Structures are given as C-alpha cells and as structure tokens.
Image (cartoon, rainbow, N blue to C red):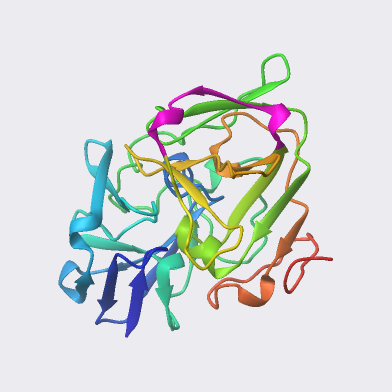
C-alpha cells in the first residue's frame, strides 16, 4: 500500500493497488502546474484510491477542455486527478516503494533547455503512442523563447501571475529534500535564487498564496490561487526571491549548479547527470 499526502497534510489518501506506469512528463503544462522541471505520476483506477481526509480542500483548474488540474488550496501541492478512465497520482507525494512501476519520459521534446535527461528510461518526444491525454493531439508547448532586452519573463499555469528577472541567479539548485518533493509534487525542486533587485512582479501578485510549514525555519512555497501553478517565493527579511525554474518563459541563460539533499531523494529516481551531488546542503 502507498499513502499520499500534500505538503500541509490536509489531503491524505491511500492506494490499494500496485503502482503502475511511472511517467515523467516534461510538457509545459505539467511543468507550470508543478513548478518543477518535470512531473512524475503513477496511474491507478479511480476505485483503487481511498480518500482519508481533505477532499474538501481540493480545488481544480481546467488547463484544457479535457483536463482538470487539482491542487490543495492550503499549500498548493498537486492532488490526485482524473484523466478519462485513469487516476493520476503525483509520485512526489507518495510514501513507500513503487515496486515495478517502471518508468518513461513523455513530451521530452518540450523539456526546458537547462534540464538534462540522463537516465536510460524510454523517451517519447510527445505522448506515448495510443495514449489519450490532453496533450496527445496538440504540438509540444512552450519551447522557450528568447529574452527581450535582457529581461526574462515567467508565469504561472493560467498566466494570471507574471514576473520578470534580469541577470544571472546567485544560486540554482536541484533540491531533493522531502519538503521540496511534497511541495512541488515532483521528483525534486529546481530553485533559482535571484537578488530582489533583479526581480519584478508584472501582474497577479495579489493572487499568490504562500504556505510556510509550522516546523520549518526558512522553507516556504508559493502558488497561484486560481490554477495552483508555482509562483516566486518572497520571504521576510531575505534579500533573495526563490524562483521555481520551471516558470521561466524564456531561456534564462543559466542552469542548475548541483543536486542537494540527495540523501533524501525519491527511491524511484536515478540521478545520472554530471552535476555535483551533495548529501545535504553544501558547506
């Protein structure tokens, strides 16, 4: 049995069937919704999931006519979502082993330019052949554009929240800590830190909600209250903004520097790229 929960713990559920079809999706819709380089989910029949708490804390956003994107209204974590006759569960919110769920990359042609797919899992440029999903009949979305006059734009899934940054980040880390995994409902976070002087809101700041776990000294996550998509994180008395890198709408001209908290990584994820790896935070 696998159990799942959002970051704040308001939403909890159990899966009574073996996990199947572990899929890493690189489409722009998934990246914007999760605020992560790619979304990882398993498939189950709707009857295999038993809700324990929090069904009333789930909101949804229609990313396309055929697909609702569900999320927790408190912390923004992605919730189980029905897609036709399948139920998609975000793997980043599951505890326990996934067994022989396998693995594959879909919409690999849409991955951000700064992310490397370095494992040996099967890759599909778009959807798996014969796979009915919201993206199967449309072309790969959001190949990053070019920055204009040195300003790099970004946005949430629905586009209500927009912002821009300039220059290069002070730090950019692929974080595998359990909080990042549960907050982003993904294999890991990809967090770029920009000085406040290099960041500006363009629209929708009033639509951003920030959740801080009560036991966290510095951690916080922000999301758009309309679509649940990731948003920049501002913290009191911190001179940097944390940027979920998946939100960039153009090539930022930089990339991740290292994997951190690798000792906490998901058991179903293999990390094979050339970035340095640190068990915890580097000194």
Measured as percent of width and height from the top left, residue 36 is found at 53, 50
Rendered residue at 78%/59% (across/down):
275
Rendered residue at 72%/62% (across/down):
259
Magenta segment boundaries in residue numbering:
195-208
Q: Is residue 271 above or below residue 244?
A: below
Q: Quadrant of the C terminus?
A: bottom right
Q: Residue furthest front?
A: 237
Q: Identify which residue, 266 or 109, lies in the foreground.
A: 266
Q: Quadrant of the N terminus?
A: bottom left
Measured as percent of width and height from the top left, residue 164 is found at 61, 25
Q: In this figure, what is the number of numbered marks?
A: 0
Measured as percent of width and height from the top left, residue 31 is found at 48, 45
Q: Identify which residue, 97 or 113, lies in the foreground.
A: 97
Q: Is residue 182 magenta?
A: no
Does residue 10 appear to the left or right of 183 in the view shown? left
Q: Residue furthest right?
A: 283
Q: Residue furthest top?
A: 149
Measured as percent of width and height from the top left, residue 63 is found at 31, 38
Rendered residue at 48%/56% (across/down):
212
Q: Is residue 206 magenta?
A: yes
């Amino acid at each position: 049995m696998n159990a799942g929960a959002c970051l704040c713990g308001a939403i909890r559920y159990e899966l009574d069937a073996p996990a199947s079809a572990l899929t890493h999706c690189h489409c722009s819709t998934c990246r914007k919704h999760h605020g992560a380089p790619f979304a990882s989910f398993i498939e189950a029949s709707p009857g295999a999931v038993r809700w324990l708490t929090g069904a009333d804390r789930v909101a949804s956003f229609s990313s396309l006519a055929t697909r609702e994107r569900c999320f927790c209204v408190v912390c923004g974590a992605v919730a189980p979502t029905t897609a036709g006759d399948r139920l998609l569960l975000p793997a980043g919110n599951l505890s326990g082993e996934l067994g022989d769920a396998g693995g594959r990359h879909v919409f690999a042609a849409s991955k951000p330019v700064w992310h490397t797919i370095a494992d040996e899992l099967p890759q599909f440029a778009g959807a798996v052949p014969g796979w009915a999903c919201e993206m199967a009949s449309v072309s790969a979305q959001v190949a990053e554009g070019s920055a204009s006059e040195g300003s790099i734009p970004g946005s949430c899934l629905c586009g209500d929240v927009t912002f821009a940054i300039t220059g290069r980040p002070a730090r950019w880390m692929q974080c595998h800590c359990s909080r990042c995994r549960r907050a982003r409902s993904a294999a890991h976070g990809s967090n770029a830190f920009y000085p406040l002087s290099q960041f500006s809101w363009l629209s929708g700041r009033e639509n951003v909600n920030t959740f801080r776990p009560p036991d966290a000294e510095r951690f916080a996550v922000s999301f758009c209250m309309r679509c649940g998509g990731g948003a920049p994180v501002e913290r009191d008395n911190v001179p940097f903004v944390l940027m979920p890198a998946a939100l960039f709408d153009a090539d930022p001209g930089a990339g991740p520097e290292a994997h951190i908290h690798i000792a906490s990584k998901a058991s179903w994820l293999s990390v094979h790229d050339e970035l340095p790896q640190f068990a915890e935070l580097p000194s």
